Amino acid sequence: MFGSEHRVRDQEELRQALAELLPRLRRFGRAMTGSVSEGDDLAQAACERALKRLAQLRVETRLDSWMYTMMRRMWIDEMRSRRIRQHEPIDAAEEVIGEEVRRLPRAGSLSRRYGEPLPNYLTSNARC
């Protein structure tokens, strides 16, 4: 009923158009992600976003083009987010740990500072 040239006017028309377009969106998502489940999740998330942002759909824009562009951008954002989640904690932890380790006093300086010998378990394993 709705071709790719069809212009959507309201929420109900968008729902119907997305229902017809869904098999193509799922195929596109699967091809882009390389995974059936991630592709389906991407198509679903794009449909949800389209329903929320119907007002942003321009009259001259084809619905399928709008959806493909949205899915591509969402996937790029997901890849960036995954890359950050993989590397940021390690990098941030190294910076914090590195600063903390540099600020720790050496084992010998503690005994000199307080005038008391350190317990054996502190001095035997200390390699600062």
Image: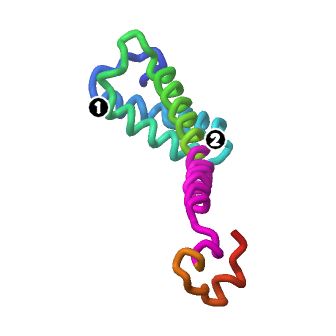
Which of the 4 quarters of the picture holds residue 23? Answer: top right
The residue located at (36%, 20%) in the rendering is 57
Q: Using the image, tell me which numbered label, if any, was put on residue 56.
A: none
Three-letter residue code for mark 2: Thr
Between residues 84 and 43, which one lies in front from this camera angle? 84
Colour treatment of the image? rainbow
Q: Give the range drawn in magenta.
A: 83-110
Estimate how packed mark 2 is, as few (under 14), some (14 to 19) or many (20 or more) residues with alpha carbons within 10 Å: some
Question: Which quadrant of the figure contains the N terminus?
Answer: top left
> Horizontal and vertical percent for residue 116?
56, 86
Question: Circle 2 sits in a helix, a strand or a loop, which is it?
Answer: helix
Q: Name the residue under label 2.
A: 33
Which of the 4 quarters of the picture holds residue 52? Answer: top left
The residue located at (58%, 46%) in the rendering is 82
> Horizontal and vertical percent for residue 25?
54, 34
The residue located at (62%, 49%) in the rendering is 87
Nearer the observer, disc 2 or disc 1?
A: 2
Q: Is residue 77 depicted above or below 41 in this figure?
A: above
Is residue 62 found left or right of 81 in the rendered image? Answer: left
Q: Name the residue under label 1.
A: 12
The residue located at (65%, 75%) in the rendering is 108
